[in-house]
């Protein structure tokens, strides 16, 4: 099929191009407006309040119970499931797979970045003593687990098997 030609075909060419653009994956992603329907509504981080604490079992063949929490976002009231600290207010970020779960923990797509306004790195390096020792131990453990899981995912991208 050839392109329409002639003097009065400008409108036809324009409207055909406008319809065909929607077949382009990147154009459709940026113009559908689905980014605003996601929990973070277009932003990279969001603040939330921990509602309840849950233990989630790992998928087969692994066996572990991960400490997770149901969190309600402050900005829009949406509820999420994430790996959590034992505190009340957290800053949340995506887990790194663009809305998909990571590793063997089903349904957990988010992770915490800050706890009560203090970054995990500051707590890990013990630069801020706002928490008691049990909570600091848990945050350090969680930080190590987070780092190891991201490293193993990164290394898994390069494996040939």
Image: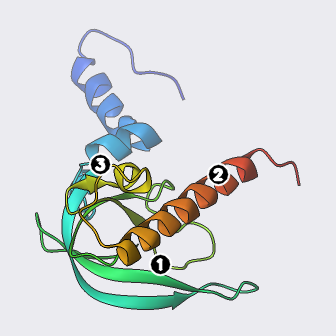
Quarter the N terminus occupies: top right
* Residue 130 vertical position relative to residue 11 in the rendered view, above or below: below
- The residue lying furthest to the right in this view is 161
Foreground tag (1 vs 2): 2
**Residue behind mark 1:** 107
- Label 1, label 2: how far apart the Cα atoms are: 20 Å
Secondary structure of the residue carrying tag 1 is loop
Badge 3, how many Cα within 10 Å: few under 14, some, many 20+? few
Q: Note whether residue 84 is visible.
A: no
Q: Which of pointers 1 and 2 lies earlier in the amino acid sequence?
A: 1
125 shown above or below 17: below
- The kind of secondary structure element at disc 2 is helix
Q: Earlier in the sequence, mark 1 or mark 3?
A: 3
Q: CA distance from mark 1 to mark 3?
A: 19 Å
Disc 2: CA contacts within 10 A as few (<14), some (14-19) or many (>=20): few
Residue annotated with mark 2:
151
Where in the figure is residue 96, as x and y percent of width and height? 49, 53
Tell me the residue at 63%/58% (across/down). 148
């Amino acid at each position: 099929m050839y392109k329409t030609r002639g003097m009065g075909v400008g409108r036809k060419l324009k409207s055909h191009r406008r319809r065909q653009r929607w077949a382009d994956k990147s154009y459709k992603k940026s113009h559908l407006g689905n980014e605003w329907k996601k929990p973070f509504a277009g932003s990279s981080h969001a603040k939330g309040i921990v509602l309840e604490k849950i233990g989630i079992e790992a998928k087969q063949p692994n066996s572990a119970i991960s400490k997770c929490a149901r969190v309600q976002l402050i900005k829009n009231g949406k509820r999420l499931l994430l790996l959590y600290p034992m505190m009340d207010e957290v800053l949340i970020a995506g887990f790194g797979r663009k809305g998909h779960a990571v590793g063997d923990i089903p349904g957990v797509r988010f992770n915490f970045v800050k706890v009560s306004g203090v970054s995990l790195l500051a707590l890990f390096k013990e630069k801020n003593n706002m928490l008691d020792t049990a909570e600091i131990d848990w945050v350090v453990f969680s930080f190590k687990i987070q780092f190891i899981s991201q490293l193993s995912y990164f290394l898994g991208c390069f494996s040939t098997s």
